[in-house]
Image: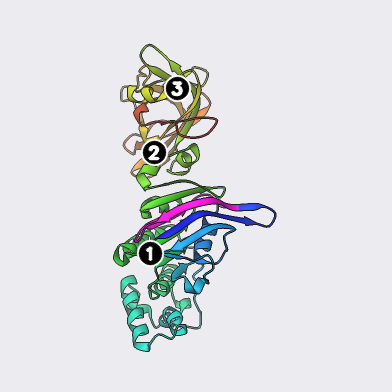
Amino acid sequence: MARVILQNISKVYPGNIRAVQCANLEVDDKEFAVLVGPSGCGKSTVLRMIAGLETPTTGTIRIGDRMVNDVAPKNRDIAMVFQSYALYPHMTVYKNMAFGLMLRKYPSDEIDRRVREAAEVLDITELLDRRPRALSGGQRQRVALGRAIVRRPKVFLFDEPLSNLDAKLRVQMRLELSKLHARLQATMIYVTHDQVEAMTMGDRIVVMLDGVIQQVSPPLELYYRPVNRFVAEFIGSPPMNMIEGYLESGEHEFFFVALENKLRLRVPKQLSVLMKGYAGKAVVMGIRPEHLSANKEQREKKGEGFTAVIEIVEPLGSELHVHLNLHGKIVIARFSSEQIPQVQQPFVLDVDTGAACFFDPETQRAIL
């Protein structure tokens, strides 16, 4: 296997359409990296440039020790799995998996050994004599994976391979892909628009927006320490609550003030030290739904919580997503299912401001 290194990669289409802008990324050997972002952010274009299906306008791409900008896709020693299974309908599963090796004129015994080993890994041995029309969506996706595995490439590339599957099957295939990565110890680069897929599968996640890489971090670092407001809101479900306000300096402490002085929260001392330069200035506070908790006595403590009116309660089995109206601003809290608040009733929430993120409203960058 091998590292993949992108240096100052850009892709500009006719009409000055900038799909990717000055992307720098290193994917380590045996790493599972996930590119995530909204539609049109450039993630699939990056993958296609690594595969050789698109030519970068500027910059260099290295796979291992070799620069591959001018190397044909078939000679890059990569295998790609697309959103579409693209199986040959007239061939059996066995022949679909073996076809690439047959074109490369591998010995028949070597082809048979590789196909059967891959089928065992993917638990599709009993399907080898079937044709694609006799398979379920999940089984077809496994065959597409098997076709890539038999190649034993340096790098596996996945372009939203689970998008055509139903919700339950997607969860199952996420687990299968994670186990496959652990078993093969392969370098894998995976593209998705689903942040849940990214969080659960990736060793590191690459968040993109408008062709620009915003942050490259392990999942939990991305979740708790986003570098800007976009990453904070994109990663996490429900998304992080954002409240615009300003930082007020008090005697030996700071307060976050918002919603025409109707919201006033004390900023913990460890954060106040880092935010001195923003005293009296506008800031945006981000708070995750799980950091809003029900006040057991339903008594609002000064600087530690607020009262809001419950608008919607979404039961999700083990937890509830509660939408509250805070003086015209909707915030979402995550409760356990043991607490079932009444709709259209005022409710007191405690706020863990120690877990809050603060952002500069002009640059959108994280202050902390």
Could you tell me which residue is drawn at 47 percent across and 40 percent down?
233
The picture places residue 138, in percent across and down from the top left corner, at 42, 67
The picture places residue 331, in percent across and down from the top left corner, at 46, 32
Task: Give the Cα distance between marks 2 and 1.
Answer: 29 Å
Position of residue 350 in the picture relative to residue 161 (left or right):
left
Q: Quadrant of residue 5?
A: bottom left
Magenta stretch: give its range: 19-39
Residue at disc 3, secondary structure: helix
Earlier sequence position, callout 2 versus callout 3: 2
Q: Residue furthest bottom?
A: 108
Residue 56 visible: yes
Position of residue 311 in the picture relative to residue 13 (left or right):
left
Tell me the amino acid under the disc marked 2. Answer: Arg
In this view, 151 is above or below 226: below
Tell me the amino acid under the disc marked 3. Answer: Gly
Earlier sequence position, callout 3 versus callout 1: 1
Q: Quadrant of the C terminus?
A: top left
- Residue identifier under label 1: 2
- Residue identifier under label 3: 277
Q: Which mark is residue 225?
A: 2
Task: Give the Cα distance between marks 3 and 1.
Answer: 45 Å
Residue at disc 1, secondary structure: loop
The picture places residue 181, in percent across and down from the top left corner, at 34, 63
Residue 136 visible: no
Q: Is residue 78 magenta?
A: no
The picture places residue 364, in percent across and down from the top left corner, at 51, 34
